[in-house]
Image (cartoon, grey):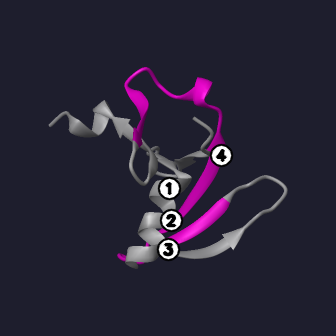
Amino acid sequence: MKETIYRSSTGEFWTGTQIWQRFESGKWTPCCWDSESGVEWVETDSETLLRLAPVSPSDLPEEVRLERVSQGVVVEDERRMVA
């Protein structure tokens, strides 16, 4: 599974596929990108600025896993599913 994984400034994890889905749907707008570090800044539809920093899959918490779907790879985070 070759996909860049990002950790947001809110502690959530996203794949490049999920980020592009949000760009295409209008939920997020790209603001800045640092080509050296790979860090991206996006604005959400609620006007929040998020910093997205690439991380290694080995840095993911135990409750976070990657899943292949028809559109690419997505993050499944069990921490978000617990109410």
Question: Per the image, is 83 magenta?
Answer: no
Residue holding disc 4:
54
Instruction: Give coordinates of residue 65: x percent, y percent.
Output: 42, 29
Report the residue at 40% width, 79% height from top. 26
Q: Gap between marks 2 and 4, in whole Å? A: 15 Å
Is any atom of residue 3 visible in this view? Answer: yes
* Number of numbered discs: 4
Mark positioned earlier in the residue sequence (2 or 4): 2
Residue holding disc 3:
43
Q: Nearer the viewer, mark 2 or mark 4?
A: 2
Q: Is residue 82 left or right of residue 49?
A: left
Q: Is residue 33 left or right of residue 66?
A: right
Report the residue at 58% width, 59% height from top. 51
Mark positioned earlier in the residue sequence (4 or 1): 1
CB under 8 Å between discs 1 and 2: yes
Residue holding disc 1:
17
Element carrying mark 1: helix
Is any atom of residue 44 visible in this view? Answer: no
Element carrying mark 3: strand
Mark positioned earlier in the residue sequence (2 or 3): 2
| Residue 20, label in figure | 2
Give the residue type at disc 4. Answer: Pro
Furthest toward the top, the residue is: 62
CB under 8 Å between discs 4 and 1: no
* Other residues around mark 1 within 10 Å, as few (<14) / some (14–19) / many (≥20): some
Element carrying mark 4: strand
Q: Nearer the viewer, mark 2 or mark 3?
A: 2
Give the residue type at disc 1. Answer: Thr
Q: Quadrant of the C terminus?
A: top left
Give the residue type at disc 3. Answer: Glu
